[in-house]
Image: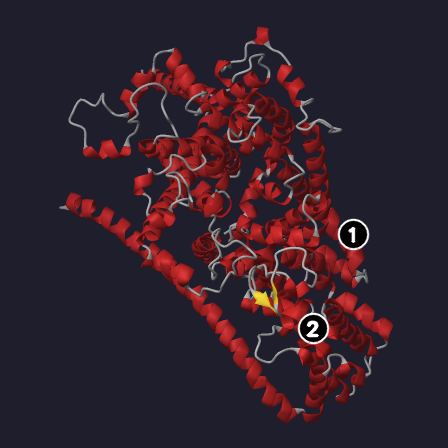
Amino acid sequence: MLMFWVRLKRALFALFAYTWLIMTVIIALVPISYMVSAAFSPVRRLRDVPVIPRITEWSLVNFREVFTYRSTGGQLLPDYVQSFLVTGLVATVTTILVVIFSSLVGFAFTRYRIKGKKPALLFMLGLQMFPGFMGMIAIFLIFRVFGWLNNPFMLALIYVGGAIPFNTFIVRGFMRNVPKSLDEAAAIDGATNLQIMRKIIVPLAKPIMGFIAINAFMGPWMDYILPSIVMPRNETVAMWLFRMNDPATTPHEPMLFMAGAMFISVPIIIVQIKMQKYVTYGLVSGGEKG
Amino acid sequence: MDTVIRFVKKPLKLLLRLLWFVFDFLANGVIRPIHKLFFAVFKGVGDFFASIPRARRENPSSFKRGLSSLFLPGLGQLKNGQWYKGVPILAILVLFLLIEFISGNYIYAPGEIANYPAEENLYFFRDYGGIFTRGIWGFFTLGALVAGDVYRGEPIVTEDARLDWMMADNSRTLMGEGVIVLVFMAFFLAIWAFSVRDAYITHIKLRAGMEIERFKKWIRNVWDDYFAYIIIIPGAALLVLFTLMPFLFSFMVGFTNYDAAISLRANLIEWHGLTTFREVFGAEPGFRDFFITTLGWTTFYAIVSSITVYVMGFIQAMVIESRPIVGKRVWRLILILPWAVPGMVALLVFSNIFDASDGLLNQILSRHDLLDTTRTILRFEFFPFDRFAFFDDIWLVRDRVGDIEWFTHHENANLARLIIILVNLWMGYPYFMLLITGVLGTIPSELYEAADIDGGSANQKFRFITFPWVLRATAPVIITTFTFNFNNFGVIYFFTGGGPAYPRAEVPQALIGIEPGKTDILISWIYTMAFESGDHDTYNLAAVYSIMVFVLIAFVSIYYLSRLRSFWEEDD
């Protein structure tokens, strides 16, 4: 008899759990399937797009439009391709510099004695808290004075500067769990600083550097505010997406937005899913474990 | 009696806890850091001034060596025999002077000043100064002459001036250049100070019998001993250029009268002291009221959205990890999709879903004739009893016919706020689901086995083992999520754009054009105020609000750090 009740309870719980999961899955999928449906839909207006993609009526007309649309006649490349290449350049430069500079700073803050380490860390933490784009008037100004507007390399430098505080904390959180005995032993054996760095610290820190690299590479693709201010005539992908979806600008093409957004989202989603095991780095990213 | 005591005890305990928390926050998060900072600054300055007479008394000859570096940076090093230090320092000085001279108009000065009528104003540094003196002049005055003024007998022009100084002053540029110049000057002064100190210390060592290192050995020593500082340099330089300098600039804008009413070159920006702060804190009731309303919603949003994503993530993790569920990996893979979709794309798609005219939701509702039913539900009209007046304010939807105006009707503000929190939940909880799933795996199974032996129920196991363990491991992330959401610009800007707007009549005169939307959080309000209000762009107010956001968040974070012992431990 008792067994029966236990079984019933379990069955009820299973029923409840499955219902709950199916519900949440549906909610999770609706906006995504809406985007996919719109991207592959032959209709011209967002109103007519069904939530669930109609497999029989799919068409690539939106994608064809995205990859051929030029806002001015004489352009060599379509807007979207152009913005894609620009963003790719920014992301690549950012990644290389971020990995080099911020891991160097991170190593310095974990592997060496530095005077004023604590104030410096607090200072970086504080800088991060100031609403970033309030500095944009100043960045815009500096860029105009030096003629750096619309220059992807200089945009990348802003990203690098901005990424340093956060990554320093990440590297610090990671490296303090790596024992120092190895580099101390090497130092006793007479290895130089550079040798220790190249042969010991960098190999040990590879996973965290990979994490930083992927993060740095992903950042520029979906950043809108900063490029819209310092690259007014050199669109990035995020700016393109925003422009297509903005009712206030003239080619307001939500259908193209959906197609372009889907095209850029797929690789990002794949990378994110591959990265999910790094989620626990969130525990160190706030700085420290308690 | 016992039950009575229990009923009183619990809330009392909670209240005490809350009070303690507030007290602890004020003490450790606000007062202590401020006290510490002031103490450190005063002590530093005091120690410095106390050390000068001491150095003079104890090592008079070394003190003199220091003085010679004060007189001319690098001279002390040269006298000490360290040419490899003295020459570069001198070279930096020469470089500075050279830049100053070349960028200035000093060569014209003597001839012209002699002929200049004594009774008329002459701005020497403005006209003849190089980049550094002109920068400092500009920073403190923010310019002197604008279009229409007469200077040297001719009118000032706004473009194509024959001579530099007939050009109208652009206060904003002057201020920006001033900040840049001040940062460089600070750098140079630091080198100068180093030179003085180094000359003094090296001389003491020399008197004690130390030999002067050869150049090569010195280089090697520096490379070995200061390696950590050297590898920081490139990162620090970028940080100063692209983070610190903009920070300083916008900080200073808060102390000026800069808004869109000032058209550069025709008006001057002026230093305004604390006027804007005073307006925000009460001199202008409109500012204060809107600030408090927006701050309240921002805080509410930050707290509620952090809690909802955490709780939902927890529930999902527990459900997926529970025994009857098969195919855990597949469920998880589907459920993390909202987290994997880039936030901006998701938010823009959502803004299309909730669009009043074309949106998916209205489209579905109207196709199934559900618009009125939805209204009824949202208005709580199905509620059998007399509805509380409360619901009238909190819930929703007064627009009568046709599509529901999710973000456009000003009386739907709370509906819009609710939707924002739900959308944030949609985007945010998968992250916590993953995180908590990871943490669940780290709970030692012995704990559960021990609980089984003692006959603990599933409930008790959750309450006494799972929950405390997970909470402890994830506590830091909750705080960072809070600060992140407090400044979560994208959710508002890409999704509702701050709407619904306040009706014109409710906006006080001083705020027209820069008023927040009803769902604007501080950060998105600041942005629209500074960049997207057209003729009403108000930079000084935006800067003041940024400073206040900064201070608020800083206190929370400092408090949080103060509770983490590991941050304060030296780790080497």
Q: Is residue B287 above or below residue B398?
A: below
Residue at 71 percent of width and 31 percent of height:
A82
Three-letter residue code for mark 1: Arg
Which mark is on residue B191?
2
Q: Is residue B92 left or right of residue B357?
A: right
User: Can residue B415 be seen in this snapshot?
Assistant: yes
Which mark is on residue B153?
none
Q: Chain ID for label 1?
A: A
Q: Does dot 1 land on a helix, a strand or a loop? A: helix
Reading the image, the residue beneath label 1 is A198
Q: Chain ID for label 2?
A: B
Nearer to me, B24 or B531: B531
Nearer to me, A214 or B545: B545
Three-letter residue code for mark 2: Ile
Q: Is residue B240 above or below residue A219?
A: below
| Distance between mark 1 and mark 2 Cα atoms | 31 Å
Residue at 52 percent of width and 16 percent of height:
A45
